[in-house]
Amino acid sequence: TLFAGFISSDNKVYSKSLNEGDIMIFPQGLLHFQINTGKTQSVAFVSFNSADPGVQILDFALFTNDLPTDIIEGTTFLDAAQIKKLKGVLGGTG
């Protein structure tokens, strides 16, 4: 089982749990994540369709939305206190 998602260009979080055989498409150039939430190893197949990925501003993508703090903590080198402080400054929740 994978928990996967992406942050849209207007900083809205889209996420879902993926089970065997499920598919999720990540729009080009957007910040995305996948976390193995199962008890065994996961296998994922990915493909890219463009050499021009586009641009997204990381600070706003991570800290101006409702993406849970524990997910940001698990994918960055920041601790929960730092994340909550940045969310407070930039207007995010969670």
Image (cartoon, rainbow, N blue to C red):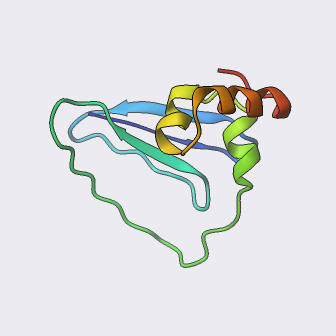
Q: Is residue 12 above or below residue 75?
A: above
Residue 84 percent location from the top left of the image: 70, 26
- Residue 85 shown left or right of residue 74 in the figure: right
In the picture provided, is 73 more to the left or to the right than 35? right
91, above or below 75, in the image: above
Q: Quadrant of residue 38?
A: top left
Residue 92 screen position, x and y as percent? 75, 28
Name, please, the residue furthest toward the left.
Answer: 40
Q: Residue at x 61, y 76 (%)?
A: 52
Out of 27 and 39, give the one closest to the viewer. 39
Where is 72 relative to 47, above or below? above
Q: Is residue 86 above or below residue 42?
A: above
How many numbered discs?
A: 0
Q: Residue furthest bottom?
A: 51
Residue occupying the far top of the picture: 94
Quarter of the C terminus within the rendering = top right
Quadrant where the image shows the N terminus: top left
Using the rendered view, name the quadrant where residue 78 is placed. top right
Residue in view at x 50 percent, y 51 percent: 26
**Viewer-side residue, 64 vs 24:** 64
Q: Residue at x 60, y 69 (%)?
A: 53
Which of the two residues, 39 or 52, is positioned nearer the viewer here?
39
Q: For residue 77, which quarter of the picture? A: top right
Q: Position of residue 69 (x, y in %)?
A: 58, 27
Who's the residue at 41% across and 45% down the image? 24
